[in-house]
Structure formats: structure tokens, C-alpha cells
Image (cartoon, rainbow, N blue to C red):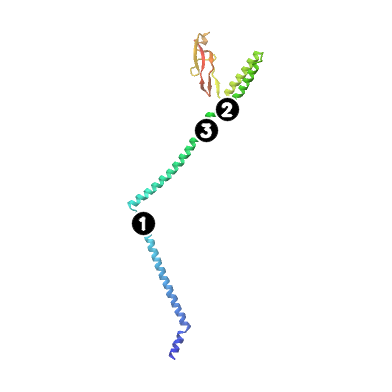
Amino acid sequence: MHNQKNNDKDMNPNNKETVREEELKAETKQNSVEEELQNAANEEIAIEEVTEEAAPLSTEEQLAKQLEEALSQIEDQKDKYLRLSAEFDNYRKRTIKEKAELILNGSEKSISSMLPVIDDFERAVKMMETATDIEAVKEGIALIHNKFIGILGQSGVKVIETKEKELDTDFHEAIALIPAPSEELKGKILDCVQTGYTLNEKVIRHAKVVVGE
């Protein structure tokens, strides 16, 4: 009879729930303990990392770090130098090419402007073969000459004035001295043997002249 009561007690649902609660509490407590242990381990690792970071570098480590930084800067400067050198080389080649083209073709505009004068000369030479009016030929040649001087003037070329001018060695070259026909003409230019020219105010050929004395 007594054993029957004990079995009934063991089969009581309330007792089963109590056991289950105890098991859950024990499991929860175990999980909490494991979590605390894991947190402690993580904190220890973090402390070690901070300690390592805060630890001062040795002399060898400092020198190695400085050397690494210096090598990095040298490599960067080398790259900049190579790029600038390549750019300058391209600029130099382009400038040389442009200068060569300028020297080769720089006079193209002036020569092109003179071609009509050559055409006029060719027509004048052809007309002189059958011309009977000498004055008309002279007039045609004079017009061509004036046209040519005008074209030169557009390019900055000017004739150096000489008629009855004082001798100026900056512009004139005296090749002969002759007696002056009057006192007023002494020291002045009496004749021009070869015309002189300036280009943009610079003498490109002195005028060869005869001076009175």
C-alpha cells in the first residue's frame, strides 16, 4: 500500500514541472557562466592588443619604419619625375618641330604676296618684245616697281631715305666723297649707289651713298 502511494507521488504532474523548471534554471545558469567566461576571455585579448599597440617601438623598429616611409616617398617622387620628364621631352620635340616648320615655311606669306609682281614682270617682258612706245614701257616698269615696294611695306620693309640727308652711319655707308656743288650740301648725301632697307625699324641693308665735301 505504501509503495502504491510513492508511485502515485512520482507520477504527480506538479512534480514533473518542478523538475523541468530546475533543469531549465540549471541550463540557464550554465549558459550565463559560459557567457561570462567568453566575455572575460575577449577582454583579456583586447587588453593584450592594447598593450601591444601602446608598447613603444624599439630603435630597430623605428629605423625600419622610417626607412619604409623614405622608400615610399622616393618611389612617389621618382614617379612624378618620370612623368614630368616625359611631358618635357614631348614639349621639346613639339617645339623643335614647330620651329623647323617656321623656318621652312615662315616666308610663305611674303613670297605669295610677291607672286603678282612676278606676273606683272612676265607680262611686261612679253610686251617689250613688240612694244614701240618706250615711254609706255617705262611707265609700266615704274608701276610694277611701286607695286613691289608697296608689298614689301606691308611686310614691314621700308626704304632708307638718302636724298640730301645728313650722313648717318647707322643707316648709310659712304663709299665715295666728292666736292659739294654748294655749301649747303657739304656733309650731305648727293647720290645713292645702292638702296638700303629696314625691316621693322631694323637695318637689313645699309644704303651705299656718295657724300659731298
User: Which three-letter amino acid code belongs to the residue tagged 1?
Assistant: Ala
Kind of element beneath mark 2: helix
Q: Foreground: 178 or 128?
A: 128
**Label 1 vs 2, first from the N-terminus:** 1
Taking the spot 51% from the left edge, 31% from the top edge, the residue there is: 100
**Label 1 vs 3, first from the N-terminus:** 1
Q: How many numbered callouts?
A: 3
Report the Cα–Cα distance between label 1 and label 2.
Answer: 78 Å
- In the picture of the structure, the residue carrying the numbered disc 1 is 54
Nearest-to-viewer mark from 1 and 2: 2
User: Which three-letter amino acid code belongs to the residue tagged 2?
Assistant: Lys
Report the Cα–Cα distance between label 1 and label 3.
Answer: 63 Å
**Label 3 vs 2, first from the N-terminus:** 3
**Mark 2 packing: few (<14 Cα in 10 Å), some, or many (20+)?**
few
- In the picture of the structure, the residue carrying the numbered disc 2 is 109
Question: Hey, which residue is sitting farthest left in the picture?
Answer: 59
Kind of element beneath mark 1: helix
User: Which three-letter amino acid code belongs to the residue tagged 3?
Assistant: Glu
